[in-house]
Image (cartoon, rainbow, N blue to C red):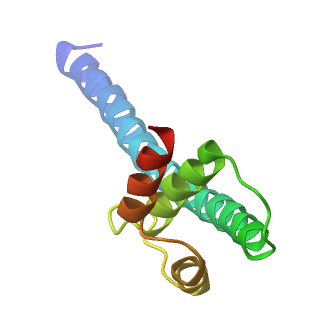
Amino acid sequence: MSTLEALGGIETILTIIISVTTISGIVIHFIKKAIKEELRHVRINDCKNYLVAFLADVENGERMSVEEIERAYEVYAEYTDPKDLNQNHYVKDQWERLMKPRAEYEKEVKINRE
């Protein structure tokens, strides 16, 4: 076997390795994208379920701890933030009907804690 033949074989092997690596990278990219999108849907549903249950309790006059209310404000912020989940529909309408703006709530809590 001559040197040129040996180099041709190595070139073929390297081409195959590079092709497999490139294809693997593309496949991994699409798998990661699909997982990320599925996780986003799970987060949306978790937030929506939490907020609907919380707001039902508020509407039914259930007594809430300060921590439960603060957690609801956090979840609502994540749920409606344009840079995060960016959801805006019946949950937002119900929230705005039942809840005070966060700044107003925080001011009230601060006064009650003093």
Along the line of sight, which residue is nearer the eye, 50 or 101?
A: 101
- Toward which corner of the image does residue 114 lie, by quadrant? top left
In the picture provided, is 107 more to the left or to the right than 35? left
Residue 91 spot, x, y in % from top left: 60, 79
- Above or below: residue 37 compared with residue 87: above
Residue 46 spot, x, y in % from top left: 68, 58
Q: Which residue is at a point 52% across and 63% down the rendered structure image?
A: 76
Q: Which residue is at a point 35% across and 60% down the rendered structure image?
A: 103
Q: What is the total number of numbered labels drawn onto the structure image?
A: 0
Residue 78 appears in view: yes
- Above or below: residue 97 compared with residue 35: below
Q: Which residue is at a point 45% across and 60% down the rendered structure image?
A: 105
- Toward which corner of the image does residue 10 lie, by quadrant? top left
In the picture provided, is 84 more to the left or to the right than 44? left
Q: Is the N terminus in the top left, top right, bottom left or bottom right quadrant?
A: top left
- Above or below: residue 86 compared with residue 89: above
Residue 84 appears in view: no
Along the line of sight, which residue is nearer the eye, 4 or 54?
A: 54
Residue 95 spot, x, y in % from top left: 56, 76
Residue 16 spot, x, y in % from top left: 38, 35
In the picture provided, is 52 more to the left or to the right than 74? right
Q: Which residue is at a point 54% across and 56% down the rendered structure image?
A: 75
Along the line of sight, which residue is nearer the eye, 68 or 18?
A: 68
